[in-house]
Image (cartoon, grey):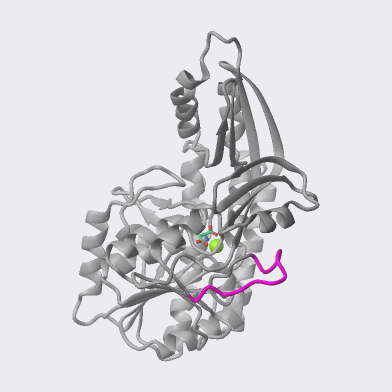
Amino acid sequence: MAKVYKFGGASVKDAEGVRNLEHIVREAGNDLMVVVSAMGKTTNALERVVEFLDAGKEEQALSQWVDIIDFHVAIMKQLGLQPGTDIRLQGEIPYDPNRSYDENYDQIVSLGEIMSTQIIAVYLLKQGLSVEWWNMPKLLRTDDTWREARVNDEVSRHTIRAGWDRPQRPNIVVAQGFIGGTEDGRRTTLGREGSDYTAALLGNYLDAESVTIWKDVPGILNADPRIEPNTVLIPSLRYQDAVELSHSGAQIIHPKTIRPLENKHIPLLVKPFGDPKAEGSRIADDGVGPIGVPVYIWRKNQILITMRAKDFAFVLEESLSEIFDVIHRHRLKVSLIQSSAVTISVCVDNTRFVPDAIKELQAHFNVTYNENLSLLTIRGTTPEILERAKDGKTIMLSQTTRRTARLVVVENN
Ligand code: ASP
Ligand code: MG
């Protein structure tokens, strides 16, 4: 039976990470699908290339691009690979001023995963493993919703199974997370941090026995160890609890990851790549729930937008669908909603789509907004825990139900 291993950018940020990946993969046995993200912060760096090009700053784009290539060449050399001979990296930036920003984004940003998987596949091969490199833009079929492409399961399942079920297939397949392709061969991306989702889809298509996400933390913790000093590991979870955690903004797994696995009852394991023998966390049908400890989830870079009807003839309740239409069209990610008779407030991720959405909302409402906010969700809270959490923070808005508290907090940098 197939197993799927997913390695994120942090686990392959340098040559040492790639060597560690090799050790983990070697232990896994046959029929292993290895899904890899871009190395380190490459995706962010490629995003900057797109931004520079779009702004007409070609020199800066080129220098950023050269840095990215140099970063990969350095890792290749440390791994004993010959740039140019073992792997030919993309020479030119695939930018076309006639295409939309988002389409250019996908053609450029997708290269992070192409480069990381090429390096890793060749390295594993050179270490004597039986390996095949897969080009996901040809295998994972999506529509052309650039940057948020939707996967065509039917076509993708078929092509991926056909590749996997071949009699002479090598033991290990190395594939890119996060990227796919359209029918006419253009590369697409599935949304930031989408590699987990790819791993889950592949697990589903291959009827895998498990999907393991290798991370730089011991497993799923009840809080971010960089923020909270006393975190605990949650060894066993139900799918439903994992979904809620990821939707509240827990960075641990991408929200779209759970569904494809739950549908086929495939366990999801989250394990530390620095300590492969550790148990980590396991999300499965027989997971333990509800989670027995309070869980703290921070969602950063939020903006709170408050709309007030311009005159009272304009009943707010009746304009809700209009508001959500604007939100939907501008791809805003809503993290919290609160309404009163005359106002409605939405807390959303502060993306580059926000200004245009606000402009549109201003046509109908008096709009005010606050930036530099974080949303803290505490699941399994008590009044005492909530009091402690509020201490020393500037709170813009709070929403509590019996077990869950959500605080919109001013970030203090
Ligand atoms: N490399 C992509 C990103 O950083 C996808 C991923 O890491 O999951 O967003
Ligand atoms: Mg990444």
The residue positioned 73% from the left and 57% from the top of the image is: 388
Q: Is residue 232 magenta?
A: yes
Can residue 79 be seen? yes
**Magenta stretch, residue numbers:** 224-235
Give x and y (percent) for residue 351.
Answer: 60, 41
Q: Please give left or right for residue 221 compared with residue 393 in the image.
A: left
Quadrant containing ligand 2 reads bottom right
Q: Is residue 96 above or below residue 245?
A: above
Quarter of the image for residue 145 reads top left
Q: Is residue 82 above or below residue 263?
A: below
Q: Is residue 385 magenta?
A: no
Q: Main secondary structure of the magenta part?
A: loop
Can residue 81 be seen? no
Nearer to me, 124 or 359? 359
Image quadrant containing the N terminus: bottom left
The residue positioned 36% from the left and 53% from the top of the image is: 181
Give x and y (percent) for residue 303.
Answer: 65, 39
Quarter of the image for residue 312 reads top right
Q: Is residue 353 above or below residue 89?
A: above
Nearer to me, 140 or 237? 237
Give x and y (percent) for residue 385.
Answer: 67, 58
Q: Is residue 10 above or below residue 378?
A: below
The residue positioned 27% from the left and 58% from the top of the image is: 156
Q: How many marks on residues?
A: 0
The residue positioned 45% from the left and 80% from the top of the image is: 122
Quarter of the image for residue 389 reads bottom right
Give x and y (percent) for residue 260.
Answer: 33, 60
